[in-house]
Image (cartoon, coloured by chain):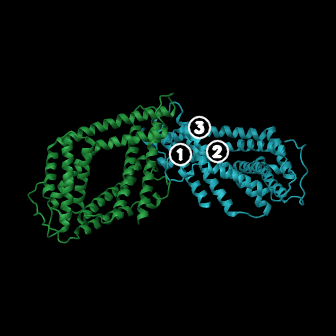
Chain colours: A cyan, B green
Amino acid sequence: MAQQHREPLLTVADASAGEALARYLHQQATEFLRGLRLHADGGEAAGAAGLLRSAARRIAGALEVYRPLTDTGWADALRDELAWAAEALGREYVCEARLARLRGALHRLFGAPAAGVPGTPGVGAARAGALLERQLTLARNRAHSTALQALGSARFHALADAVALLSADPPLAPSTRPDDLTALAARTHRLLLDAVGALPLSVAGLPYNAEALAHGPDADGRQDVPWHRVRSLLRLRRYAQEVLDEQHRAEVEPALSVRLLTAGQALDRHRDAAGAAAAAAAAARTPRIAPATAYALGVLHADQRHEVEAARFAFGRIWQRAS
Amino acid sequence: MAQQHREPLLTVADASAGEALARYLHQQATEFLRGLRLHADGGEAAGAAGLLRSAARRIAGALEVYRPLTDTGWADALRDELAWAAEALGREYVCEARLARLRGALHRLFGAPAAGVPGTPGVGAARAGALLERQLTLARNRAHSTALQALGSARFHALADAVALLSADPPLAPSTRPDDLTALAARTHRLLLDAVGALPLSVAGLPYNAEALAHGPDADGRQDVPWHRVRSLLRLRRYAQEVLDEQHRAEVEPALSVRLLTAGQALDRHRDAAGAAAAAAAAARTPRIAPATAYALGVLHADQRHEVEAARFAFGRIWQRAS
C-alpha cells in the first residue's frame, strides 16, 4: 500500500468518470473513518463494526470493478487488506446472527423450550438449543477477541492510514473517456449474468424440488458454491451501480438497483441458512450427545437446508420476473 | 348383514337411478369375488388384496353416498364390515410402501449406504435405514398374519356371502326419480367443498411456507386431520361420480373426474409422507440408538414433513386451477 507509484490525481476537466469514482471512494472512506471513530469512542460496537464493514466492502468493490481506472498495484493491495478487515470484524456478528436464526428455527419447529420427560421431542430440542448456544457463543467470543486484536494491530493502523489517504486523494489513473465507468460496470454485469447462467435455475424454480437437501450433507458445500458466487457478484454489481449513480448524481436504473438488492437479499438468506445448517450438522458431531439431541439437530439441519432451497426458489422468481 | 329386512329389488322400469347403482354394485361385488378367488388360488397376493380393497372401498363408498336409495340398516352394517376388511387387508401394504418411501428418501438424502467411519453421516443413515427396515418389516409381518387371520375368519366368510348376495340382488329402496343419483352426488360434493373450505389453502399455496414442520412433532397429527378428511371425501366423490358415469354409460364430467383423481393423488402423497414422517419419529424414540442414527432419523422426519408441505401445495394448485 505504499503510495510512491501513484499517478497524479485527475482534474475535473479530464474525466467525469474518475471524478465520480473519486467522489464515491471519498464518501466510503469517510464512512470507514466514522466507523473507526465510533469504535474508538466506545460507541455501539455492532453499529461501528457494521459501518466499517459496509464501507470496506464498498471501497474494495469499487476498486475491483473500476480497477483499470486506478493505480492497480496500490488498489489491489488495499483490496486485500479491506477484505481481511471486513472478515475479521464480521465474524462475531455472523456467529450472533447464526445463533439467533437457529434459536428461532428451534422455537418454530419444537415450540417453546420446556423441561419435560426425557425422550420427548421438547427435551431434545432444548438440549440441542443449549448445545448450539454453547458452541456458537464460544465461537462468537473467540471472533470478538480476534476482532479486537485486529483493530489494535499495526496492520489495521496501516489500513486506516491508507483509507485516510484514499479519502483525501484517491490514487486514480488518468481516465480517457467519461463512459469508462459504464463499460466497466457492464463487464461486471456480464460476469454476473454468466454466473447466474451457470445456476440450476430450472430445477430451483420448481417449488419443493428437494435438491438442497439431496445427496448427503457432504454435498451441501459443493452445491452451494455457485450460489455464493452469484451473491458476491450481485453485491459487486450493486456497488458498481452506486458509483454510476454517483456519476449522474441520481439513480440511473432504479429498477435494476432494486432487483440487485432483492436478489442479493434472497442469496444472503441462502448463505445464512446454509451456514446455520452446517452449524447444526457440526453440533450433531459433538461426542456423547443424547440421541434426542441429535434427532432435534437432524430436524434443524433439514429445516435449514429447506430454507436454502426456499431462498434459491425466491432468487429464481426475482431474477426471472425482472428479465 | 341379515337379509330379512330387504325391500324388493327395483325393476328396470321404475328407476334408472336404482338400476345404475345396482349395476355399479354388481360390478364391484364381482371384482371383490374375483379378488377372493385369486387369493384362494394362491395368485399374486398383493394383486388379490388390491382388488379386494379397491372393490370394498367402492362398494362402501357407493352405499354411503347413495344410502337413501338402499336398505339402510343392511347397507350400514355392510359398510362397517367392508371398512374392517379393507383395513385388515391393507395394513401390510401400507407398511411395505412406507418402508420403500423411507428407503428411497434415505438414499436421496444421504447417498448410497456405505460402511464407513463411525460418526460420518453415511453410517448414521445406514443404521437408521437398518432400524426402519427392522421395525417396518416386523410391523408388516404382523399385519400379514392379521390379514391371513381375517381372511380365514367366520366374519370374513359372512362378508363374502353378503357381497355375493349384493352381486346377485342388491337391497335397494324404491327410487322415486331418476335424478336421485345426481342430487345425492351433489350432497357429497358440498361436503367436499366445505371440507376443502376449512383447509388453510392460502398458507399452503405459498411455496416454502414451512407450516408442515412447525409447532413440534406432536402437532403433526392434529394439523394433518383436515387434509385426511378431504382425501376421504375426494375418494367418496370420485366413487359417486363412477356411479353417475355408470348411469349414463359414459364419463359425465371428464374434467371433474380427472381433477378428483389428481387432487386425491396429491393427498395420497400427503398421507404417505405424514405416515413416513411419523415412522421416522417413532424409530428415533427407540431406546439406546446411536446419536448418528437419531440425527439421520431427524433429517428424515423433517424431509417427509417437507413432502407433506409439498403435497399440500400441489393439492392447492390442482384445486385452484380447476375452480
Q: Earlier in the sequence, mark 3 or mark 1?
A: 3
Q: Chain of mark 2?
A: A
Residues at discs 2 and 3 both on one chain: yes
Q: Which residue is mark 2?
A: A94
The nearer-to-camera label among 2 and 3 is 2
In the figure, is residue A72 to the left or right of A238? right
Instruction: Report, in whole angstroms, how far the alpha carbon at label 3 lies from the one at label 1.
Output: 25 Å
Q: Residue at x 35, y 36 (%)?
A: B135
In the figure, is residue B322 to the left or right of A316? left
Residue A135 disc label: 3
Instruction: Report, in whole angstroms, how far the alpha carbon at label 1 lies from the one at label 2.
Output: 22 Å
Instruction: Report, in whole angstroms, how far the alpha carbon at label 2 lies from the one at label 3.
Output: 13 Å
Q: Amino acid at mark 3?
A: Gln
Q: Is residue B226 visible to us here?
A: no
Q: Which residue is mark 1?
A: A212
Residue A179, relative to residue A136: is it above or below?
below
Q: Amino acid at mark 2?
A: Val
Q: Chain of mark 3?
A: A
Label 1: element kind: loop
Q: Residue at x 50, y 28 (%)?
A: B116
Quarter of image, res A245:
bottom right
The nearer-to-camera label among 3 and 1 is 1
Q: Is residue B33 visible to us here?
A: yes
Q: Number of labelled discs? A: 3
User: Which residue of the protein is positioned furthest toward the front in this rendering?
Assistant: B250
Q: Are marks 2 and 3 in contact (CB under 8 Å)?
A: no
Q: Position of residue A112 (x, y in %)?
A: 48, 48
Q: Residues within 10 Å of mark 3 (few under 14, many from 20)?
A: some
Q: Earlier in the sequence, mark 2 or mark 3?
A: 2
Residue B218, relative to residue B61: is it above or below?
above
Label 3: element kind: helix
